[in-house]
Every structure is written in structure tokens, then in C-alpha cells.
Image (cartoon, rainbow, N blue to C red):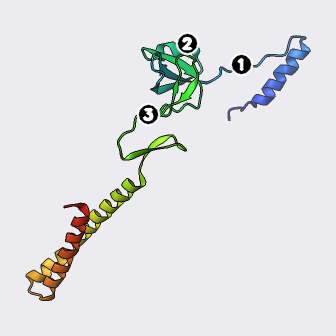
Amino acid sequence: MPRVINARRTTRRMREAAKANGSAEPKEAVRPRMRVVWFYHKHTGLFHGRNLMTDDPALIGPNTPPEHVAIEGHHFDPVSQRVDVASGEIVDRQPPQPSADHQWDTTIRRWQLKPEVVAKEDERRNALERIRYLELKALRSLREHALGQAAAIDRLKSIDGEINELRAILGM
């Protein structure tokens, strides 16, 4: 069975041996510091879609996109922040409005669909789902009508009436 060496004991033994020999205590290796580096356009200050995490500063230059500048930091929001090129400070930014159906939400700093637009989309989605359900339900009534059952035609008319009401909601 291989012998397992306890790293703490080895370190303590190394220190004791160093003291006994009169030499200085062994120094621990310094770990390189991890950095998060973002890139922004040197003229507009807009953040690039990519960032870099590295412990080697020599890798920052080769990974910097053309026409961009590297800036170190962890908590940048490329959608709602940019760099003020003149001062180098991070400033808030409001991207262009995607459509007239959107409004700016200051809490999350994003464009959101207006509540009335969301409600209209929900109503449309629910109407389409109900039409799909009714059309599947009509298959049984069609089979019964084909077999000569008299009540099947009334069920088909009822289903068709409800589908027509839902189509009016959809604007069809």
C-alpha cells in the first residue's frame, strides 16, 4: 500500500528543519490574482459582448478586440452601462427603445413590454389555445355525425359558434 504524506506535517517538518539549520523559514509561493477584464470601444464607450478572466496580465493585450480598451472590474452591465470616454468613469446608459410597445423599467434598467401589450398577447395566446382544444373536441362530434347521431350536429354548431367568438377576439 502506498504511503500517504500529510501536507501539513511535511510543511511543519520543513519549518522545524529550517529552524534547526539556522536558515530562514521557507516562504510560501504567492498565488497570482485572478482578474475579470471587460472591453469597451475607445470612441463610443460601449462594452463589447465579451470579457476575460485571467491571472496572467500578459494575456489581456492579445485578447483585446480591435478598437477596444481593457478595463478591470467584476460588476459591469454591458446593456445599461457604458464608459464615459473623456473621464473613464462608468455611467448609466439607456439603450434605444426596441418598439413603441416597450417602456423603460428603472428598477432593472431594461426595456419591458407594456402591461397592456402583455395582456393582449396573453389573451391572443389563450384564444388560440382554446380554438385548438375546440377543434380537437369537434373530431368526436364529426365521427358521431358521420355515424348518424342526431345530437352531434348540435354539438358541432355549439363548438363552431365558440370558435367564431374567439376568432373575433383575434381579429380574424
Q: Amino acid at mark 2?
A: Ala
- Left or right, 58 with reference to 66: right
Q: Nearer the viewer, residue 13 or 72?
A: 72
Query: Badge 3: how crowded within 10 Å, few (<14), some, or many (20+)?
Result: few
Name the residue at 85% across, 20% down: 15
Name the residue at 55% across, 28% down: 91
Name the residue at 80% across, 16% down: 26
- Left or right, 30 with reference to 152: right
Quarter of the image holding residue 141?
bottom left
Quarter of the image holding residue 164?
bottom left
Residue labelled with disc 3: 95
Residue 54 versus residue 96 in the image, above or below: above
Quarter of the image holding residue 34?
top right
Which mark, by number, is residue 110?
Answer: none
Q: Are marks 2 and 1 in contact (CB under 8 Å)?
A: no
Tag 3, which secondary structure?
Answer: loop
Q: Position of residue 151 (x, y in %)?
A: 15, 88
Residue labelled with disc 1: 30
Q: Position of residue 29 (x, y in %)?
A: 72, 18
Q: Amino acid at mark 3?
A: Pro
Which mark, by number, is residue 58?
Answer: 2
